[in-house]
Image (cartoon, rainbow, N blue to C red):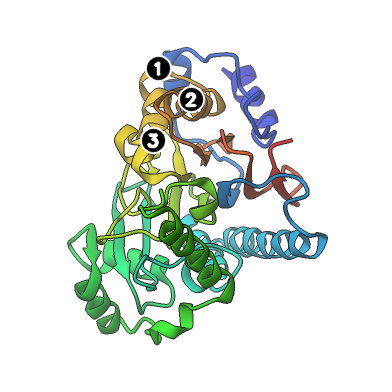
Amino acid sequence: MKKIYALFLLTAFVVMPLGTLGQKKASFGEMKELQGPQNPRLGFMIHGGAGVIRRGSLSPEREKEYRAKLEEAVMAGYKALQAGRSGLDAIESAIRIMEDSPLFNAGKGAVFTSEGKNELDASIMDGKTQNAGAVAGLRRVRNPISLARAVMEKSEHVMMIGDGAEKFAAEQKLEIVDEKYFWTQDRWDGLQRILKREKEQGNTIEDGKPENRFGTVGAVALDKEGNISAGTSTGGMTNKRFGRVGDVPIIGAGTYANNASCAVSATGWGEYFIRLTVARDICSLMEYRGMPIQQASDMVINKKLQDLGGDGGIIAIDRFGNMGISFNSEGMYRAYINAEGRPVVEIYAD
């Protein structure tokens, strides 16, 4: 038993972008035994969305901006954990930083619907209690992740949407902004390009294309109490219609956390993540089949999701600090804290 536990600690923070970590399958009994009370390291990971992100697709200046903001966010979450705060606190802190940045498709940088509006979704989940909160269709709440947490902790509900959710946000004294706050030139230009193509082609442009939906943000955490948690926030797809809601606020699809298995935050083509309940499926493979976290992540993302025709990626962590990163797109903005307590920021698949 001591040898097995030592092996898990040594491999806890070795992360491979496309899944060479943990290929040796743990036995079911072995996994269950390891899930007893331990004193794990702190662990923190974030993502800023998956999509068409090839080397050379970002200018050096733009890439530097992304790397700086990802490092800022991952360090904010990790410092919260170091200060003894909960994983939920760390997740909220990091995601708020990304929501306030126009670089990501969440909060300030959200994409536009076909009507030229910004509609925001978010969710958060506590792996210890299985409590969760989610919001969808927000137009005036500055930080949707904070409202998702308020739904979880200060109401008897799991999900709130639209005007009702925003009324609840006002009651909870969360910051309400004018809709113009979310407007950014880059996202507006992106919508105009799609609308122009629609007019030229005389039909509806498929808004599920990778370039129209990357930028969702998320985080997973392991805190000093050995509890794991997950959170995700997004503006959805460019040119989305009819009140479309993706996987982010759907517990089990875009966000899931359970101390018995893992915590997952997803990004990608939401319809496919909903159909496969991607986040929950990864945790189920760990819980019921004893799979290591990276193997479970790769099976769902690079096999099940890809075979169905979906693309995107996830970050995941278990209660021992073992991490998983898997994506089948050309890149994913991501960052984590390594075993030395230093931030590692990655963008490309290679």
Q: CA distance from mark 1 to mark 2?
A: 9 Å
Q: Nearer the viewer, residue 312 or 2?
A: 312
- N-terminal of the pair, mark 2 or mark 3, is 3
Closest to the camera, between mark 3 and mark 1, is 3
- N-terminal of the pair, mark 1 or mark 2, is 1
- Residue 23 place in picture, x, y as percent: 60, 17
Residue 215, quarter of picture: bottom right
Against 181, is 65 above or below? above
Which numbered circle lies on residue 289?
Answer: 1
Q: CA distance from mark 3 to mark 1?
A: 16 Å
- Does residue 4 appear anywhere in the picture? yes
- Residue 322 place in picture, x, y as percent: 58, 34
Outermost right residue: 60
Quadrant in the picture for the N terminus: top right
Against 202, is 52 above or below? above
The residue labelled by disc 2 is 296
The residue labelled by disc 3 is 278
Residue type, mark 1 in image: Arg
Q: Secondary structure at mark 3?
A: helix
Mark 1 vs 2: CB contact within 8 A: yes
Closest to the camera, between mark 2 and mark 3, is 3
- N-terminal of the pair, mark 3 or mark 1, is 3
Q: Report the residue at 60% width, 24% height from top.
A: 5
- Residue 159 place in picture, x, y as percent: 23, 59
